[in-house]
Image (cartoon, grey):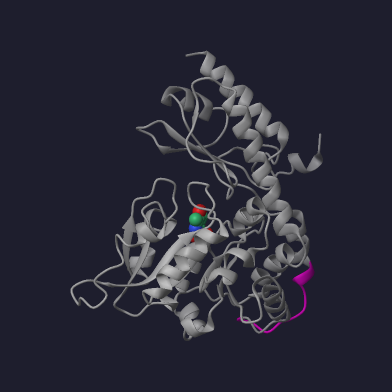
């Protein structure tokens, strides 16, 4: 037996993986190696270190000469900082009803950022110019919070992906109405892998002003960055990040993780693999009668509808979450460390549990 599995300080089985969340995965070994490399000696705190400096170069290579990265601890923090950066005190954010900023951040944009969210129901997690217009009105009406930014998520909370043209249309529409565009790119890498284009193709190249760039779901231990793509849209980012409690003192350890992902192709390898596992899973699930796949599988998520009882039995064998328990909807997420065997074992278990009905 692998001696490390019996180490008394280890409190879990490193061979057990499920389909609950890409956040359940650990850190990629190359990220861990990079953290060790950045250790030792003294470096200036609060972002004046050599790793954060180098990260700027890498970010510019991905997003163009005017891009500037502000590393932060987590995705909620990235969103709250980014959204505040492009709004006034009276500003509001138009987003999909299913957006993470609306349903999964404990009201942080509202309470910590003081931002009104104007939500729109969508069939697939994606906004369109027409859907934006359901909330893009009353700009001069002092009784209404002023729509100042459209926030989209790529890939979306439902695992779907905007094409570059769809993002362009949103940006043109928003800009024509005096609004900026924020993109929650917690899973930006998965979208790039699906579209098979560089990340800039569907961000700064088509008009996105500010980005929350994910690291954690892509193989980092922790750490994301706000990436300013349009410097004219923002003011005092450094002050805003500190005031929002997202300024890491030992920032080199956030920056070096993003460097490990982005300097070469680890970000893409990890995202491609996670996406491929989701495709394999979807294929397996499609062959099981009575299970419906709910959304196009375009990133690392598979949403499905099946009898609740089957899901409950399956949950005793593999971790995953209900998305809408009453409807019988579940979400199965793959990550950079999901294996083909994991997927095949899960599909086999699903088949067995469906047959037991
Ligand atoms: C779309 C999206 N945005 C942002 C986040 C970041 O959240 P956290 O604050 O947990 O890092 C998540 C995490 O699940 C997410 O799915």
Residues rendered magenta in the picture: 37-46
Quadrant in which the N terminus is drawn? top right
Residue drawn at 58 percent across, 45 percent down: 298
- Judging depth in this view, the residue of 313 and 270 nearest the camera is 270
Q: Name which residue lies at 67% across and 55% down.
A: 219
Q: Residue 132, percent across and down? A: 36, 61
Side (left or right) of 30 relative to 87 = right
Q: Compared to 238, does 188 lie above or below? A: above
Q: Relative to 186, is 293 above or below?
A: above
Work out whether 286 lies above or below 218.
Answer: above
Q: Position of residue 166 (x, y in %)?
A: 50, 59
Instruction: Kindly identify the residue that appears in the image at 78 percent across and 61 percent down.
Output: 33
Asked if one can make out residue 302 in the rendered structure from this viewpoint, the answer is: yes
Dividing the picture into quadrants, the one containing residue 206 is bottom right
Q: Main secondary structure of the magenta part?
A: loop
Q: Quadrant of residue 175?
A: bottom left
């Amino acid at each position: 037996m692998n001696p490390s599995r019996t180490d008394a300080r280890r409190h879990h089985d490193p061979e057990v993986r499920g389909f609950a969340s890409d956040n359940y995965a650990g850190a990629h070994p190359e990220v861990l190696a990079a953290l060790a490399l950045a250790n030792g000696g003294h470096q200036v705190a609060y972002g004046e270190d050599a790793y954060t400096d180098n990260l700027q170069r890498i970010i510019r290579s991905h997003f163009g000469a005017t891009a500037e990265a502000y590393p932060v601890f987590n995705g909620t923090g990235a969103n709250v900082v980014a959204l505040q950066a492009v709004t006034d005190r009276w500003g509001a954010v138009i987003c999909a009803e299913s957006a993470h900023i609306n349903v999964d951040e404990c009201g942080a944009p509202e309470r910590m950022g003081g931002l009104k969210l104007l939500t729109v129901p969508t069939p697939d997690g994606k906004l369109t110019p027409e859907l934006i217009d359901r909330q893009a009105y009353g700009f001069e009406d002092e009784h209404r919070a002023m729509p100042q930014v459209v926030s989209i998520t790529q890939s979306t909370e439902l695992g779907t992906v905007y094409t570059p043209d769809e993002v362009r249309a949103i940006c043109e529409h928003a800009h024509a109405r005096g609004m900026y565009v924020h993109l929650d790119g917690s899973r930006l890498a998965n979208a790039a892998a699906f579209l098979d284009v560089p990340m800039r193709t569907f961000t700064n190249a088509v008009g996105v002003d500010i980005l929350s760039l994910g690291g954690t779901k892509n193989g980092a231990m922790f750490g994301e960055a706000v990436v300013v793509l349009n410097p004219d849209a923002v003011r005092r980012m450094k002050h805003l990040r500190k005031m929002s409690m997202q300024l890491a003192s030992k920032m080199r350890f956030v920056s070096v993780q993003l460097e490990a992902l982005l300097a070469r192709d680890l970000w893409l390898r990890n995202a491609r693999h996670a996406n491929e596992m989701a495709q394999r899973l979807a294929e397996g699930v499609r062959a099981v009668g009575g299970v419906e796949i709910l959304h196009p599988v375009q990133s690392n998520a598979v949403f499905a509808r099946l009898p609740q009882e089957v899901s409950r039995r399956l949950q005793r064998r593999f971790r995953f979450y209900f998305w809408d328990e009453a409807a019988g909807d579940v979400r199965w997420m793959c990550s950079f460390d999901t294996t083909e065997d994991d997927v095949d074992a899960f599909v086999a278990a699903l088949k067995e549990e469906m047959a037991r009905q």
